[in-house]
Amino acid sequence: MELSKVTALMKATALEFAILTGHLVLYPSGIVAERLSPKAPAADPSTGPDATIAPGGLRPVVLLHGFVDNRSVFVLLRRVLTRHGRDCVESLNYSPLTCDLRSAAELLGRRVEEIRARTGHAEVDIVGHSLGGLIARYYVQRLGGDTRVRTLVMLGTPHSGTTVAPLADAHPLVRQMRPGSAVLRELAGPAPGCRTRFVSFWSDLDQVMVPVETARLDHPDLHVHNIRVSGIGHLALPVHPTVAAGVLGALDAAGPVAPGAHEGEPGAASVA
C-alpha cells in the first residue's frame, strides 16, 4: 500500500476512535425518545379526509440511525439542518431488540404518517446512516414510501451487502445486511415508477463497508446520485462538516436527477 494511503488510513482511524469516544458519552442521551414537533393546523374536511392545510417552510426531515445505535449520532447533523431553516427535524429510535429490517421499515412508515398528519406536509425527507439507510430504502421501495418521501439520503449504507465482522452473523439484522440476503434481493428487484430521489454517500476509507463500493447504490429503476467521500471512515459520515454540507445540499436540491445511478467528479468530496 502506498505511503499516502497508509497515512490517510491512519488519520481516518484516529478520527474514528475520537468520534467513537465522544459518541459513547452522548449515547445515553439518545436512548429516550425526543419531544415531538408542534402540531399543524387541523385538516380541512371540505377537501377530503386525507387533505391538510398546506404549511409553510421546508419539508420535515426524519433521521434514522444505524445498527446498535440511537438518535444521538445525529446531534451535529441536526444542528446544521436546523441552522439552515429545517425547523422540523425528528429522529426515530428503533429497538435494539429489532430482528427484522422489514419491521423497522413498517415502524418508520407509521412515524412518517404521524409526522405528515401533525405538520401538514405531504412529503418528508429522510437521512439514514448505515442500516438506517437500508431500512428507509425498504420503506420507500417495498412499502409505498415513495409517495411520502421526496429525498432519501443514505450515509454508508450496505446496498449490496457487507462482509465485515463475520462473527456478528448471530444477529438477524446483520444477516440481512450480508450479500445475497433475502432483503437485499428484494431491494435489487424491479422498482418501476419509484418517485423518491436517492442520494448515497460512500467513503473510500469506510472499514465497515466491505467492499467500500457496497455503499454505492446502482439500480436501473431509481433516481440516484452517488457521492464519494475521501478521507473519513464509517462513524464520521453523520458528523463530519463536509458531509453535513453535502446532505444539506442534497435535501435542498430542486429537481430530480436522471434515472439510474451516476457519479461525476463534482460529486466527490475530499475531507482529507
Image: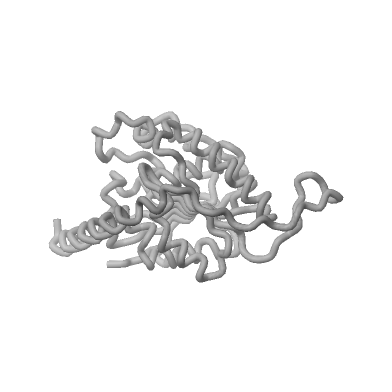
29 left or right of 39 in image = left
Nearest to the observer: residue 40 or residue 233 = 40
- Where does residue 262 sit, x and y in percent of width and height? 46, 55
Residue 120 is drawn in which quadrant? bottom right
From what the image shows, is residue 50 above or below residue 143? below
Residue at left 35%, top 64%? Answer: 240
Q: Residue at x 45, y 35 (%)?
A: 101
Q: Quadrant of the C terminus?
A: bottom left
Q: Residue at horizontal 48%, vertical 44%?
A: 219
- Above or below — where is 81 with respect to 17? below
Q: Is residue 259 visible?
A: yes
Front residue of 246/236: it is 236
The answer to whether residue 151 of the structure is visible from this angle is no
Residue 232 x/y as whole percent: 29, 60
Point out residue 29 in the picture as x, y percentages from the top left corner: 39, 53
Between 234 and 2, which is closer to the camera in this rendering?
A: 234
Screen quadrant of the N terminus: bottom left
